[in-house]
C-alpha cells in the first residue's frame, strides 16, 4: 500500500493533518493574551506549518524533514507553534504506522519521547515552555492522558516514557539523547557564544536516533553567520531542511524609499498585513495592526530592526558597508584567474588575534577577485599559543610573483608586519603614492598604513562603495564563504574628526574579522588604478626575475625539444 496520490497541485502526504486534529481534540483553552479563555484552535498558518514539517515519503512513510525552521516577525505565534510541535512529539501521532485502505497515512505516538527546548537563557526557553505549561496546567486533557505538568518539566505517568524540558545550552548540556531538539532564537546563536558548535552537537545527537531539530527564531541579521542564517542558506540546496517563514510582501516603493518615510504609511501597512495574515485581530487573531505600525515608527527602532523584527525580512545591521544581496550578485562561477595573468595582490593581517589574508584581483575591465590564502587563529588558541607562520606567508608571496604578472602589491604596513613588508620592498621595490595614476615605476610594493593614511584609505573605501552602489557588475568573485563573511562584517565608518571614510569591524566579537574584507577593498582599487594606467598607454613593469609558472616551463621545454628535432 502507498499514498493515494495528489488530489490537487502541490499536495504531498503528511501526518500533519491528523496531528492538528489530535491537538484540537484535546479541548484546550488559549492560556493568555487577547484571546485568553477561548477554545484553542490552530490558525491556518499554524496548520500549514505543521503539515509541511511532517511531510512523509509517499511510499515508505519516512520523514522528509530532518531540520525545520519557523521564522517570522514578532507576534506571529512562532513559539506557540513550536510548543504545539513539542506536545505532539510528546504523545501525539507523529510516527508513521501504515497506509489505510484509502491510501491515507496513519500515525502513532512514540513509546519513548524526549524533547529538549534549548536556548541561550532561561528567559528564551520560557517563550516556548512557559506558554506550553500554561496551556496544559490543570487541564482535563493533562489528567486524562496522564501528563504530569511541572514548572520545569512535563512527563508521562502512563503510556510509556516521555519528557519535555527546557535547558540553557552549553556543550555540557549536550549528549543527553532525545529525538527532538527545539532551538530557540537561533538568530542569536553564533561562534562567539559557542553556539555554532552546540548546534552541531545537537544535530549529531538526534541523527543517531533518527530524530530531528526545529528552530524557532526571528529573522537573522545577515552577515553574522548565525545558526539561523546558515540554516536558511543550507536549505537552498538541501530538501531535508524546511524553512517556514512569515514574511512581508514588500512593495517596491518601500524597498526604494525607506521604511520610515511618512508618505509610505499606506505601503508599510500593506506590508504589515501581508506579514501577519491571520494573526491580526482584523482576521480573527491577536495582533493589532496599529500596534505593529507604531513599533515600526518608534524613534528607537532602526530601519534594519523594523524590517527584521516587524516585517520578517532579513536585513544587515546598521552601517554595514556591503549589502549581502549585492555582493552575492557579483559571484561568477565560470570565471577564474589563469596563471601568468596580470594581477593586483593585496595583504592585510594580524600576527595573533585576527586573521591574515592574501587576495589576488585580475587587472582587466571587469576584475575577478579570489581569496588566495587565509590564516585564522585555531579555535581555543591565544597569542601565546599561535602566530601566523611568517615563512609560509613569505613563500606564498614569492610564488605569486613567480606564477603571475604582479603589477602592484598593496600591503597593510601595521600589526607587526613591518619587517616582512620591508623584505618585500627590498626584493621587488617600493611604489610611492605619487606614482599611482601617473606611471609605473620600478617598484611594485605599495605599503598602506590602513589606520593612519586618511587620503588613500578614503579613496579606496569610497571607490569600493561607489562601485557597489552603481549598476551592472563592477567586478566578480568566486563566492569564497570566508571572504564573504569578512566582507559583510565591515562597517562604514568615519576616521578622525569625521573627515575621511574608513572601515571597522561590526563589533568586537572575535568572528567579526575584516582582514579579507580590507584586501577586497584594496584589490578592487589597485586593479582599477592599474587598468587605468594601461588604458592611458603606460607600459606594465617588466616580469620579475625568476618569475615562471611550472606550466610555462613545460611549454618552453616542449618547444625547445621540437626545434632540436627539426619539427619547427
Image (spheres, grey):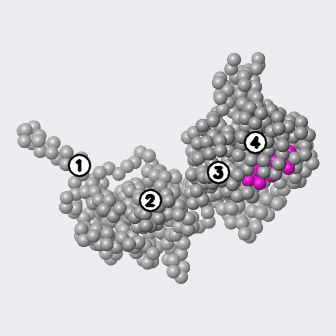
The label on residue 163 is: 4
Q: Earlier along the polypeptide chain: callout 1 or callout 2?
A: 2
User: Between tags 4 and 1, which lies in front?
Assistant: 4
Main secondary structure of the magenta stretch: helix
Counting residues from the start of the chain, the first of labels 3 and 4 encountered is 4
Of residues 472 and 183, the one drawn nearer to the viewer in this rendering: 183
Is 128 colored magenta in this rendering?
yes
Q: Quadrant of residue 113?
A: top right
Real-space Cα distance between discs 4 and 1?
64 Å
Question: Which residue reaches farthest bottom?
Answer: 497
Q: What element carries label 1?
A: helix
- Which residue shows up at 89% across the image and 42% down it? 28
Q: Earlier in the sequence, mark 4 or mark 2?
A: 4
| Magenta-tinted stretch | 125-136
Element on which disc 3 rests: helix
Name the mark on residue 262: none
Pointer 3 residue = 173
Which of the numbered marks, if any, corresponds to residue 550?
Answer: 1
Q: Which residue is drawn at 73% across and 53% down?
A: 125
Amino acid at each position: 500500500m502507498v499514498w493515494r496520490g495528489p488530489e490537487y497541485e502541490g499536495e504531498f502526504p503528511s501526518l500533519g493533518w491528523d496531528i492538528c486534529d489530535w491537538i484540537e481534540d484535546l479541548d484546550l483553552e488559549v492560556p493568555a493574551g487577547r484571546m485568553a479563555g477561548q477554545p484553542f484552535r490552530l490558525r491556518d498558518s499554524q496548520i500549514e506549518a505543521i503539515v509541511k514539517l511532517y511531510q512523509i515519503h509517499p511510499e515508505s512513510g519516512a520523514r522528509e524533514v530532518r531540520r525545520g525552521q519557523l521564522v517570522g516577525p514578532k507576534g506571529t505565534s512562532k513559539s506557540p507553534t513550536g510548543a504545539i510541535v513539542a506536545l505532539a512529539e510528546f504523545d501525539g501521532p507523529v510516527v508513521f504506522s501504515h497506509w489505510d485502505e484509502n491510501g491515507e497515512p496513519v500515525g502513532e505516538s512514540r513509546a519513548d519521547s524526549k524533547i529538549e527546548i534549548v536556548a541561550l537563557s532561561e528567559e528564551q526557553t520560557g517563550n516556548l515552555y512557559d506558554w506550553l505549561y500554561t496551556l496544559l496546567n490543570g487541564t482535563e486533557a493533562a489528567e486524562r492522558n496522564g501528563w504530569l505538568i511541572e514548572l520545569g518539566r512535563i512527563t508521562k505517568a502512563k503510556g510509556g516514557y516521555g519528557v519535555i524540558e527546557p535547558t540553557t545550552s552549553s556543550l555540557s548540556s549536550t549528549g543527553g539523547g532525545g529525538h527532538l531538539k527545539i532551538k530557540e532564537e537561533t538568530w542569536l546563536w553564533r561562534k562567539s557564544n559557542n553556539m555554532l558548535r552546540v548546534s552541531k552537537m545537537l544535530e549529531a545527537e538526534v541523527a543517531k536516533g533518527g530524530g530531528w531539530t526545529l528552530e524557532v527564531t526571528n529573522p537573522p541579521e545577515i552577515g553574522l553567520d548565525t545558526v539561523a542564517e546558515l540554516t536558511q542558506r543550507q536549505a537552498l540546496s538541501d530538501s531535508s531542511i524546511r524553512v517556514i517563514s512569515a514574511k512581508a510582501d514588500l512593495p517596491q516603493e518601500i524597498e526604494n524609499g525607506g521604511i520610515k518615510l511618512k508618505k509610505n504609511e499606506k505601503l508599510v501597512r500593506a506590508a504589515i498585513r501581508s506579514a501577519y495574515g491571520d494573526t491580526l485581530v482584523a482576521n480573527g487573531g491577536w495582533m493589532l495592526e496599529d500596534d505593529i505600525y507604531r513599533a515600526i515608527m518608534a524613534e528607537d527602532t532602526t530601519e534594519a530592526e523594523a524590517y527584521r523584527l516587524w516585517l520578517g525580512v532579513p536585513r544587515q545591521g546598521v552601517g554595514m558597508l556591503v549589502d549581502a544581496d549585492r555582493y552575492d550578485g557579483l559571484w561568477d562561477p565560470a570565471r577564474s584567474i589563469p596563471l601568468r595573468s596580470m594581477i593586483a595582490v593585496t595583504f592585510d593581517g594580524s600576527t595573533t588575534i585576527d586573521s591574515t589574508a592574501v587576495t589576488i584581483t585580475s587587472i582587466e575591465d571587469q576584475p575577478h577577485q579570489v581569496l588566495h590564502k587565509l590564516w585564522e587563529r585555531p579555535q581555543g588558541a591565544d597569542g601565546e599559543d599561535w602566530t601566523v607562520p611568517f615563512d609560509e606567508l613569505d613563500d606564498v608571496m614569492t610564488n605569486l610573483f613567480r606564477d603571475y604578472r604582479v603589477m602592484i602589491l598593496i600591503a597593510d604596513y601595521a600589526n607587526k608586519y613591518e619587517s616582512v613588508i620591508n623584505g618585500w620592498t627590498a626584493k621587488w621595490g617600493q611604489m610611492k603614492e605619487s606614482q599611482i595614476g601617473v606611471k609605473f615605476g620600478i617598484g611594485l610594493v605599495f605599503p598602506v598604513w590602513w589606520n593612519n593614511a586618511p587620503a588613500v584609505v578614503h579613496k579606496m573605501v569610497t571607490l569600493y562603495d561607489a562601485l557597489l552602489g552603481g549598476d551592472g557588475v563592477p567586478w566578480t568573485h568566486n563566492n569564497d564563504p570566508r571572504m564573504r563573511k569578512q566582507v559583510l562584517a565591515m562597517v562604514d565608518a568615519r576616521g578622525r574628526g569625521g573627515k575621511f571614510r574608513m572601515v571597522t569591524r561590526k563589533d568586537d566579537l572575535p568572528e567579526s574579522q575584516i582582514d579579507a574584507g580590507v584586501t577586497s577593498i584594496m584589490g578592487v582599487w589597485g586593479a582599477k588604478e592599474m587598468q587605468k594606467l594601461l588604458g592611458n598607454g603606460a607600459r606594465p613593469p617588466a616580469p620579475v626575475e625568476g618569475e615562471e609558472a611550472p606550466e610555462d616551463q613545460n611549454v618552453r621545454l616542449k618547444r625547445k625539444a621540437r626545434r632540436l628535432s627539426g619539427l619547427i
